[in-house]
Image: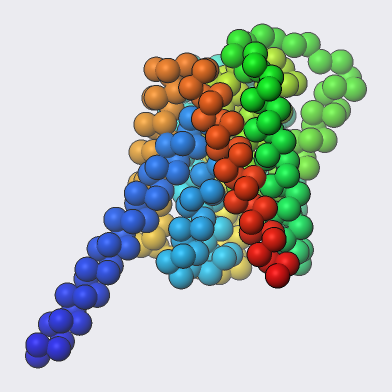
């Protein structure tokens, strides 16, 4: 009887500790993601894997949870979206096929090469943003010619493929692409990233990935709550503190995501 009681208490304590840990990881990773425009997978996905969730299930759960991040951030930044609906439609129309394609081939591609590629890109983004002092601090409306429009749509499709097959860093890529292509500031670009990538891209990728393996419902609930509250809180902080805080956080998150992905890639080759 005492042994049974001890077992129940130990299991309860571990389950409670695990639940609190997953919620806090989700909340803080999505708070930083909401400020920087991406990078929630830096903490959230490794955290799930650490707790014994298989990679494909963890990736699907992470993507479903980041839908809540997108909803939380979009609700807080709704007014920033009104004038950019046309750009949002382009991201959805040309990006979603890439997401579907990436999620469809994730079982057949070597993850370490994707990690290596995206890790290098993320570090370069951090360095570029750091040395480009005025990047994303003011908002404009650059008119695109046909060549620039085609190039933008090709990049959207390619980033969609990465989004469907890997979790970390694609939101950061979209954020910087919007800033460079249309002359947006960080707050405006991140609002679009939340709405398109956070909600629609990640939901589509999660649906396809969930066919590979079921997502644990108890973990998913914790992630959704943590992602939504973290997304709303992060978006609130970014509105209060403006583009300077967002840019600093973007640089830090980009660099950390890049280092994390490079380490994953190197470890997978060993």
Position of residue 159 measured from the top left corner of the image (x, y, whole percent):
73, 41
**Left or right: where 209 falls relative to 53:** right
**Left or right: where 227 falls relative to 90:** left
Q: Residue at x 75, y 21 (%)?
A: 181
**Residue 245 versus residue 229 in the image, above or below:** above
**Residue 135 versus residue 58 in the image, above or below:** above
Q: Residue furthest right?
A: 147
Q: Quadrant of residue 257?
A: top right
Relative depth, front residue between 97 and 15:
15
On the question of residue 220 being in view, the answer is: yes
Position of residue 239 measured from the top left corner of the image (x, y, whole percent):
43, 19
Position of residue 14 measured from the top left corner of the image (x, y, whole percent):
27, 69
Of the 4 image quadrants, the one containing the C terminus is bottom right
Q: Residue at x 33, y 56 (%)?
A: 21
Position of residue 100 measured from the top left corner of the image (x, y, whole percent):
70, 51
Q: Residue at x 48, y 30 (%)?
A: 35
Relative depth, front residue between 204 and 135:
135
Q: Quadrant of residue 220?
A: bottom left
Q: Residue at x 69, y 15 (%)?
A: 183
């Amino acid at each position: 009887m005492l042994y049974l009681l001890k077992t129940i208490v130990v299991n309860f304590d571990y389950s409670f500790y695990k639940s609190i840990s997953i919620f806090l990881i989700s909340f803080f990773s999505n708070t930083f993601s909401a400020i920087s425009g991406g990078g929630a997978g830096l903490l959230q996905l490794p955290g799930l894997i650490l707790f014994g969730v298989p990679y494909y299930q963890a990736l699907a759960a992470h993507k479903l949870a980041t839908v809540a991040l997108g909803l939380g951030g979009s609700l807080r930044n709704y007014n920033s979206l009104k004038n950019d609906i046309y750009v949002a439609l382009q991201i959805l129309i040309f990006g979603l096929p890439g997401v579907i394609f990436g999620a469809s081939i994730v079982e057949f591609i070597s993850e370490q090469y994707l990690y290596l590629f995206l890790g290098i890109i993320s570090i370069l983004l951090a360095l570029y943003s750091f040395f480009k002092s005025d990047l994303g601090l003011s908002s404009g409306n650059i008119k695109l010619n046909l060549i620039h429009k085609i190039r933008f749509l090709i990049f959207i499709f390619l980033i969609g493929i990465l989004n469907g097959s890997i979790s970390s860093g694609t939101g950061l890529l979209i954020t910087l692409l919007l800033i460079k292509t249309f002359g947006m500031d960080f707050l405006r670009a991140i609002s679009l990233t939340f709405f398109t990538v956070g909600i629609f891209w990640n939901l589509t990728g999660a649906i396809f990935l969930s066919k590979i393996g079921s997502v644990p419902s108890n973990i998913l609930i914790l992630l959704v709550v943590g992602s939504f509250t973290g997304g709303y809180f992060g978006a609130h902080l970014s509105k209060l503190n403006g583009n300077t805080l967002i840019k600093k956080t973007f640089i830090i998150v980009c660099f950390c995501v890049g280092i994390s992905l490079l380490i994953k890639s190197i470890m997978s080759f060993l």
